[in-house]
Image (cartoon, grey):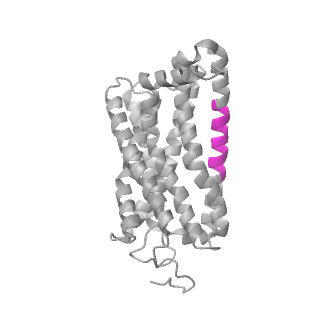
Amino acid sequence: MIEENGNSSDFSAFTHTNTTSAILITAYSVAFAGGGIGSITMSFVLVKMNTLSVTTTAIINLVIVHSLLLFTVPFRLHYYIKEKWVFKMAFCKVVSAMVHVHMYLTFLFYVITLVIRWLVFFQWKDKVEFYRKLHAIAASAAVWVFVMVFVVPVLCFEYGRSGSYNETICFKFHRELQQGSVKALNYAIIVAVACITCILLGLQIFILVKVSRRLSTSLWSHQEFWAQVKNLIFICVIIICFLPYHLFRAYYIQHMSDFDQLESYNEVFLSLTALSCLDLLFFVLSGSRLFKQKVVMLLSRLPCC
């Protein structure tokens, strides 16, 4: 199928190379397997908890948003393996949009979790505790209502509306970026994500330095240090999974019509965001006694220790 205005035909065929397809299949397979294990494991951990703090509530929401993405991953894998979309185009838009919804909701819950844990660290704990489960439910509901009222309608009515698309080709909606308003929104999001990431990293480094000076010799065996390590996991996920996509997207928006494979590279960077589903698995491992013992044993062998 050729685009209605007749100026392009790159939407009519599966354009990923074998190497690109292999990378995409590997990335989403790892995200699906590791994310599934992490979500299930964390669910069992959460069931055993008696209290419902802000941090716990944010983790619960992470489990939910990861699960929503993981539900769509098999359809992506089917497309990359078969090189043909066999489902409805409307469902293609849902699967395509879900990776973006997942990314920004995950980023939001990361920020909320980190801010709350830092408030606790600076002894402003009384201001951020949920004294009733109803408060936690209301806070979570507010976030999801915002998504359902403002985000979902925009995705349903505006996503993928610029021209006609081949029913057998999916995840090729970059034509939307030709619109000035969409470009401006993307640039604003890129700047916001980059600035927030730098602020989060700077604050976490400051806190880690403060904790290391306070605990000195008992650093590796102290619970407060490991709490900050868990915070660092969230920031590392942002830097590794989310930031590269946004930095590349700034270049991609300007040069997406230069050569065909640039769109494939954008898909590869986007697939990295799905690897954020591994966060819960690392979060569980970092809290295990065996993991801490292994880390302490490894660090004790270093000359500097």
- Residue 241 coordinates in the image, percent (x, y): 54, 48
Foreground residue among 108 and 218:
218
Foreground residue among 181 and 254:
254
The answer to whether one can see residue 124 in this image is: no
Q: How many marks?
A: 0
- Residue 193 coordinates in the image, percent (x, y): 62, 48
Q: Main secondary structure of the magenta part?
A: helix
Decide: is 152 above or below 83: above
Foreground residue among 97 and 152:
97
Decide: is 98 above or below 82: above
The answer to whether one can see residue 147 in this image is: yes
Q: Quadrant of the C terminus?
A: top right
- What residue appears at the point 59 percent right and 44 percent down from the top-left corner? 239
Relative to 16, is 254 on the left or the right?
right
Q: Can you name the residue that lies furthest to the bottom here? A: 6
Q: Choose top left, top right, bottom left or bottom right for residue 134.
A: top left
Q: Is residue 196 magenta?
A: yes
- What residue appears at the point 53 percent right and 35 percent down from the top-left corner? 233
Range of the magenta residues? 191-204
- What residue appears at the point 37 percent right and 47 percent down from the top-left corner? 33
Q: Is residue 236 magenta?
A: no
